Amino acid sequence: MAGKRIQLDLPDELYAQLLRVGESMGISNPDEAALVGLAQWLSQRVSELDDKDPSQKYLVNEALDELLEKQK
């Protein structure tokens, strides 16, 4: 997937939680688990924005939607 790259420094506890939740979802790669988590968080925030002002709807990146669908 082409796109922008970001790099995060996570506290040990947050990283451990990312691994734990990712593994429970069948995602052993922490980068992929973080991407799924970010996509879900963005989706929720976008819905909140849409609820506040329906005329300003935002589209969630199709590639992230596809990634989430693969994880189901």
Image: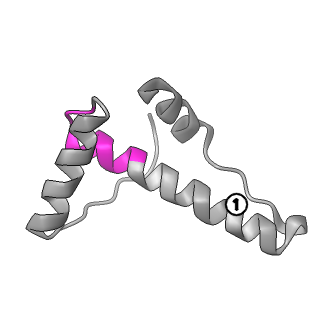
Q: Position of residue 71 (x, y in %)?
A: 42, 28
Q: Quadrant of residue 9?
A: bottom left
Are there few (<14), some (14-19), or many (20+) residues within 10 Å of tag 1? some
Identify the amino acid type marked 1: Ser
* Relative side of 27 to 4, left or right: left
Q: Quadrant of the N terminus?
A: top left
What residue sits 40% from the left and 51% below the top? 37
Spot the residue most to the right.
55
The span shown in magenta is 27-36
- Compared with residue 32, is residue 60 higher up or lower down, i.e. above or below? below
- In this figure, which residue is indicated by the disc labeled 1? 47
* Relative side of 22 to 64, left or right: left
Q: Quadrant of residue 30?
A: top left
Q: Position of residue 65 (x, y in %)?
A: 57, 37
What residue sits 31% from the left and 43% below the top? 33
Q: Is residue 28 magenta?
A: yes
Q: Between residues 44 and 31, which one lies in front from this camera angle? A: 44
What residue sits 79% from the left and 68% below the top? 51
Q: Secondary structure at mark 1?
A: helix
- Compared with residue 45, is residue 1 higher up or lower down, i.e. above or below? above
- Magenta segment's dominant SS is helix
- Compared with residue 14, is residue 21 higher up or lower down, i.e. above or below? above
